Image: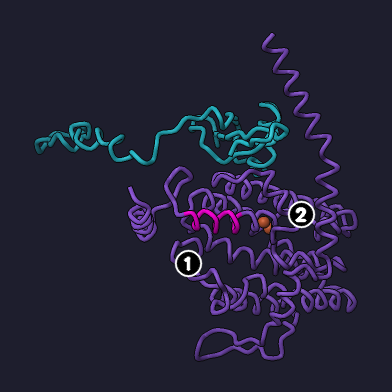
Amino acid sequence: MPDSQHEKRFQERIDAEQKVEPRDWMPDDYRKMLVRQISQHAHSEVVGMLPEGNWITRAPSLHRKTILLAKVQDEAGHGLYLYSAAETLGISREEMIDQLLEGRAKYSSIFNYPTLTWADMGAIGWLVDGAAIINQVMLTRTSYGPYSRAMVRICKEESFHQRQGYQILMTLSKGTPEQKAMAQDALDRWWWPALMMFGPSDKDSVHSVQSMKWKIKRQGNDELRQTFIDRTVPQAEFIGLKVPDPDLKWNEKTQHYDFGKIDWEEFRNVIKGNGPCNRERLAARRKAHEDGAWVRAAALAHAEKQAKKKAA
Amino acid sequence: MESKNKNDWPLWEIFIQSKRGNDHKHVGSLHAADARMAIENARDVYTRRGEGNSIWAVRSADVHASKPEDQGAFFDPADDKIYRHPTFYPLPEGVKYM
Ligand SMILES: [Fe+2]
Ligand SMILES: [Fe+2]
């Protein structure tokens, strides 16, 4: 069958809401787009453990510490689900890890911001996981089967992440004036980077049109961002915190919040590697990978020895 | 994908039985040096919230699959055997419990 014929059949299948599975024929660019998106998503889960890992040893109580540990462990699992989904497209785990460690791969720009206080654990769970949930719920309907299944699994685990974060900020906002100020400061610092997580406006997003046609993405960046704002603003009001946007206003006509301009210059700058923590994050990942090398080699040597013994 | 680099741990497919009496269902895959590590890691990633009580790990290289290209022809025989379905046999009115 000529490729054009294959491509027509492929698009018909997508239009009929049939999932694509690993061994199906697919256009090269569909495969490439997915490998890029899923591996970036996986890297984000893994690098995303670092800002929160920063507070595990300094959590204010054993209770909070066990919760944070469980949350970070979930993120490691999310990384695994996603790397596995990407591997079904023909790229190896090693290759993806190399791309990350050599600085050739992207991950979510939000994880290049520092976690300065305990309240940041609250802001991350509430806002960062909150934004991720909106994106990931959309992706449960993505056209690639393994990616969609990974998203279903991940979404089941995410709502605990968001709630534990919100609870941290709720507790602080009911505390001393210093604690409340700490909660407000965290919201002030994380609000705009969280809005940037949805990516540039659709009119400036290079891959959006093709991605929507192939149903990799099912909703545009702007629509997802608006959903996030509409849901989150009342949650902030409920705990007495103020969203740091003077232009934020409920619009009766559209039934949505109007909001101020996002600083896309900052976004591009962080993506390019000039965020406050880009170098630190990659250095931490590299060190972890190198420190683990002897464990990987030893486990393999042990397995080979056992297998030989069994064969003999 | 099975790695070409011999220093990488092989890939395993993981199947979980959610409770006794149910089928083992495919949940995903992971890399592990041997079967024991595959099962222990599967426990840590796929059953953190009581999702299962039994785990199977199978080397991905040992899984053989039908080819999607000839899906039509391959599964064709099922289509023309309508007599395999109970609705093929209408029952006279009054006959119950069948
Ligand atoms: Fe996650
Ligand atoms: Fe999360």
Measuring from the top left, give residue A172's x and y in whole percent.
82, 71
Residue at screen point 69% across, 55% down: A43
Q: Quadrant of ligand 2?
A: bottom right
Quadrant (top left/top right/bottom left/bottom right) for the C terminus of chain A = top right
The answer to which quarter of the image holds residue A271 is bottom right
Instruction: Look at mark 2 in the image and give the residue it sits on.
Output: A102
What color was chain A assigned in the picture? purple
Is residue A112 highlighted in magenta? Answer: no
Measuring from the top left, give residue B62's x and y in whole percent.
54, 27
Instruction: Look at mark 1 in the image and give the residue it sits on.
Output: A210
Q: Is residue A212 left or right of residue B49?
A: left
Q: Which chain is cyan?
A: B
The single residue placed furthest to the front in the displayed view is: A2
Range shown magenta: A28-38
Q: Nearer the viewer, residue A271 or A139?
A: A271
Q: Earlier in the sequence, mark 2 or mark 1?
A: 2
Residue at screen point 20% across, 33% down: B81
Q: Nearer the viewer, residue A214 or A132?
A: A214
